């Protein structure tokens, strides 16, 4: 007598898997799995091997012994499924400042009730750190068809006031200052903050460091277009080819 049907039914019970979910793991029909569990049919050797390997159970044990719950829990495999892993994993819930909420945020940035009303995004980032999303709304950080464009999203990590002066010049940040929310590159000179745009026609904005209400250092970027890759490399390769050709001509 084979214990295969009883054992796979017990595995399903331990992990809370429906017949359909279990069957899909091994490319079986639900009716076929039901026949296995009821003892009306025995699995093909290929199916038996797949199930035994997946749960790290010896084929002989799966067929000839009625496994106990304790035995199943001691096997090397943790008997988890992809769906369970996704459900158990926690992603950070990040409030996101949009174009329509940007002005309000500059005034209500420290009110928890307002922050809770912002739309959110979920990302697999450090849960112990504080992040904020910001939707780009202008062309200040664009230059020669590169950079950031409206609807791009940047995600910043909060910068404590004691750390602001330690950031490298040129760091991308968005800050709350003077009742505004500004996304630019940061430059520190003594106790003054200079916020510089990439667009050459935009003047620098300077503020005392003490006026900065919030600062978020950009850590992640989401663009609404596919960035241009390879242009600079291709130009350099072309120049190298030209130089090599000139050298050959001189040597020839």
Image (spheres, rainbow, N blue to C red):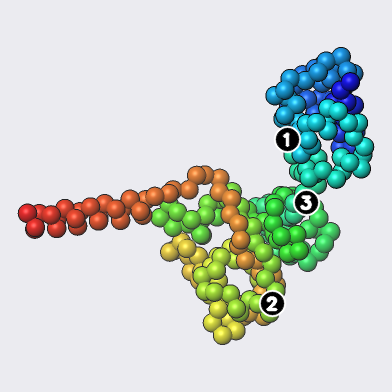
Quarter placement of the C terminus = bottom left
Mark 3, residue position: 90
Locate residue 8: give its quadrant: top right
Q: Secondary structure at mark 1?
A: helix
Image point (92%, 43%), residue name: 70
Specify the quadrant of the image occupied by residue 174: bottom right
Which residue is at 83% across, 27% downward? 63
Instruction: Give the x, y percent position of residue 164.
Output: 63, 76
Q: Is residue 73 above or below residue 34?
A: below
| Label 3 secondary element | loop
Crowd tier of the residue under label 2, counting other residues whose Cα lies within 10 Å: few below 14, some 14–19, many 20 or above: some
Residue where numbered disc 1 is placed: 53
Q: Earlier in the sequence, mark 2 or mark 1?
A: 1
Q: Which residue is mark 2?
A: 161
Tell me if residue 117 comes above or below residue 79 in the rendering: below
* Quadrant in the rendering for residue 95: bottom right
Q: Point out the tag, 2 or 3, that comes first from the N-terminus.
A: 3
Query: Mark 2–mark 3 contact, CB under 8 Å?
Result: no
- The answer to whether residue 177 is left or right of residue 150 is right
Q: Is residue 39 left or right of residue 245?
A: right
From the viewer's side, name the closer residue of 97 and 2. 2
Whichever of callouts 3 and 1 sits on the residue coming sooner in the sequence is: 1
Q: Residue at x 60, y 78 (%)?
A: 166
User: Could you classify mark 1 by the number of other residues whose Cα lies within 10 Å: few (under 14), some (14-19), or many (20 or more)?
Assistant: few
């Amino acid at each position: 007598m084979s214990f295969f049907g009883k054992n796979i039914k017990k595995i399903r019970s331990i992990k809370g898997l429906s017949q359909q979910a279990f069957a899909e793991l091994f490319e079986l029909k639900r009716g076929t799995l039901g026949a296995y569990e009821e003892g009306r049919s025995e699995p093909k050797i290929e199916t038996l091997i797949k199930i035994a390997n997946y749960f790290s159970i010896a084929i002989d044990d799966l067929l000839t012994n009625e496994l106990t719950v304790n035995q199943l829990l001691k096997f090397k495999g943790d008997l988890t499924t992809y769906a369970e892993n996704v459900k158990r994993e926690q992603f950070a819930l990040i409030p996101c400042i949009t174009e329509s909420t940007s002005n309000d945020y500059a005034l209500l940035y420290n009110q928890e009730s307002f922050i809770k009303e912002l739309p959110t995004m979920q990302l697999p980032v450090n849960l112990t750190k504080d992040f904020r999303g910001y939707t780009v709304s202008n062309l200040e950080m664009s230059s020669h068809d590169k950079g950031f464009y409206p609807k791009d999203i940047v995600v910043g990590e909060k910068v404590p006031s004691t750390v602001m002066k330690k950031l490298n010049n040129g760091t991308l940040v968005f800050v709350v200052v003077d009742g505004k929310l500004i996304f630019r590159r940061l430059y520190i000179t003594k106790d003054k903050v200079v916020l510089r745009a990439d667009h050459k026609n935009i003047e620098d904005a300077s503020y005392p460091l003490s006026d900065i209400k919030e600062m978020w250092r950009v850590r992640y970027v989401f663009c609404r277009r596919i960035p241009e890759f390879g242009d600079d490399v291709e130009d350099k390769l072309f120049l190298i080819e030209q130089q090599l050709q000139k050298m050959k001509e001189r040597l020839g």
